[in-house]
Structures are given as structure tokens and as C-alpha cells.
Image: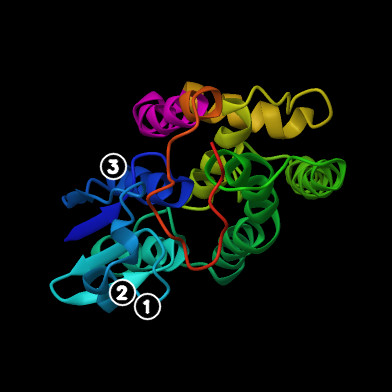
């Protein structure tokens, strides 16, 4: 299998963490975002959305990191507890994946990533939306009272949520001040799974560096987002 992925993107990192946790061999093909390799015609053939990552499993192309996580579990490790078979347990994992995709990460991306890479500003409204999403996450974690986001065992739901919160750490956003249960889970993951965290940590360090030294993307013409003026 080949995974077309960037080195610092949370969705890419989440999939790479899953491959590591499941001990599934794959080839990581680095996509250079700054050179707009995800906007080429060849890449568009694999993923018409022109987003990252994309999985190539012997000619079967699959985008959307959540779908990739679910697919590699179902096909290659169907008995793994990382994606439990019990309907209620699996439903909870699926919920957390959807929650991150539709509710939490969009606010984190808008507040953290967009101002680094594109011509967007961090605003009070953006912060309000971010805190609203984090408050919902805090409630889920507190109500569950479990070690991980979807139970007492590690699941694929933890990976994208870890890489989302990682973005906030990269810009020194204090999650623990208002969301202690989220911080406890996040810290606990890093302590319990140092090998997996190393994958995310490298991405976090890149984001932190970009925060201080924004990359020059003026050569890239993005079809949707306005490029930040240096």
C-alpha cells in the first residue's frame, strides 16, 4: 500500500499512527504542499477533492482519513480492538471520528492552520467557535469517564483527535485551563503510547516552526483559499 501524505497534516498523521499501531507495512509518499503537488492532474485522478491524504491499495484509491482508518482495520486487522465489532462500541468510535471531522477539527483548522498557511486572521469569533467545540469534547470525555475517547481501550478514534489537539499545543494554546479532562486524556495518550506520539510530535514541531516562520506559498495558486501575503 502507498499513502500519499504530508509530514505535518493532522489527517495524514492520524493515518500514519494507525498503520504503526496495527503493524501494517506501507510506503509513505510525501506530498509537497508548498509546491502544490496535491493540485496536479495526476493527484486529481486519485482524489478529485485534491485533499491529503490518499491511500493507494493496489489501484484502489481512497481519500478521507476516517474512511482510510476504517478500511485498513476492516481489511487487514478485522479482529483488532482498535476498531471493535460490537455495534455499540463501534458506533461510539464512529461518532468520535465524525465529531472530529465535522465539529472539532474544522474549528481548530480555521483558528490554527488557516492563519499560518493562508490569508486568514485569528479572531474573537474564531476563538469562540473553537472554545464551543472544545467544550463539547470536554463533555464527552468527562461523561465517558474512560481512559480513551471511545472506551477504556485505544481505538482509531483517538488518533485524529490527538492530532487535532496537537495543533493547539503547537501554538501554545492552553487546553488544560478550561478543558482539564481533554488535557488529561491527551497527556495520558502521549505517556501510554510514546512511539505513536513520536509520529504526531514531529508534525507538531513543524507546525510550531511554521507558526514562527510562515512558509512562502506565493508561488502556489489555490483554487479556494487566498494565499497569505508575506
Query: Mark 1 against mark 3, which lies toward the viewer?
Result: 1
Q: Residue at x 47, y 24 (%)?
A: 209
CB under 8 Å between callouts 2 and 1? yes
Q: How many other residues sit within 10 Å of disc 1, few (<14), some (14-19) or many (≥20)?
A: few
Q: Who is closer to the viewer here, 64 or 69? A: 64
Q: How many other residues sit within 10 Å of disc 3, few (<14), some (14-19) or many (≥20)?
A: some
User: Which numbered circle lies on residue 200?
Assistant: none
Circle 1: element type: loop
Q: Residue at x 62, y 61 (%)?
A: 92
Instruction: Give coordinates of residue 117: x percent, y percent.
Output: 52, 43
Q: Residue at x 48, y 68 (%)?
A: 223
Query: Mark 2 against mark 3, which lies toward the viewer?
Result: 2
Q: Who is closer to the viewer here, 149 or 42? A: 42
User: Which numbered circle lies on residue 48?
Assistant: 1
Instruction: Give coordinates of residue 115: x percent, y percent.
Output: 62, 42
Residue holding disc 2: 44
Residue holding disc 3: 20
Q: Main structural element of the magenta stretch: helix, strand or loop?
A: helix
- Tell me where the magenta segment starts and ends, as one range: 192-208
**Is tag 1's residue or tag 3's residue first in the polypeptide sequence?**
3
Can you see residue 78?
Answer: no
Q: CA distance from mark 2 to mark 1?
A: 5 Å
Circle 3: element type: helix
Q: How many other residues sit within 10 Å of disc 2, few (<14), some (14-19) or many (≥20)?
A: some
CB under 8 Å between callouts 1 and 3? no
**Is tag 2's residue or tag 3's residue first in the polypeptide sequence?**
3
Instruction: Give coordinates of residue 124: x percent, y percent.
Output: 86, 41
Direction from residue 52 to residue 211 in the image, left or right: right
Amino acid at each position: 500500500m502507498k499513502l500519499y501524505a504530508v509530514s505535518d497534516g493532522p489527517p495524514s498523521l492520524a493515518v500514519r499512527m494507525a498503520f504503526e499501531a496495527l503493524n501494517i507495512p506501507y510506503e509513505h509518499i510525501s506530498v509537497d504542499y508548498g509546491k502544490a503537488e496535491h493540485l496536479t492532474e495526476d493527484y486529481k485522478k486519485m482524489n478529485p477533492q485534491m485533499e491529503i491524504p490518499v491511500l493507494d491499495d493496489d489501484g484502489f484509491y481512497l481519500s478521507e482519513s476516517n474512511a482510510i482508518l476504517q478500511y485498513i482495520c476492516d481489511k487487514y486487522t478485522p479482529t483488532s480492538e482498535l476498531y471493535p465489532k460490537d455495534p455499540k462500541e463501534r458506533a461510539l468510535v464512529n461518532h468520535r471520528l465524525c465529531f472530529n471531522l465535522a465539529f472539532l477539527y474544522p474549528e481548530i483548522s480555521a483558528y490554527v492552520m488557516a492563519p499560518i498557511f493562508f490569508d486568514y486572521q485569528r479572531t474573537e469569533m474564531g476563538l469562540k467557535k473553537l472554545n464551543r467545540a472544545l467544550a463539547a469534547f470536554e463533555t464527552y470525555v468527562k461523561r465517558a469517564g474512560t481512559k480513551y475517547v471511545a472506551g477504556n481501550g485505544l481505538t482509531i478514534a483517538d488518533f485524529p483527535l490527538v492530532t487535532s489537539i496537537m495543533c493547539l499545543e503547537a501554538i501554545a494554546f492552553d487546553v488544560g485551563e478550561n478543558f482539564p479532562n481533554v488535557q488529561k486524556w491527551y497527556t495520558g495518550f502521549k505517556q501510554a503510547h510514546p512511539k505513536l506520539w513520536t509520529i504526531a510530535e514531529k508534525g507538531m514541531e513543524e507546525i510550531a516552526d511554521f507558526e514562527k516562520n510562515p512558509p512562502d506559498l506565493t508561488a502556489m495558486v489555490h483554487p479556494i483559499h487566498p494565499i497569505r501575503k508575506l
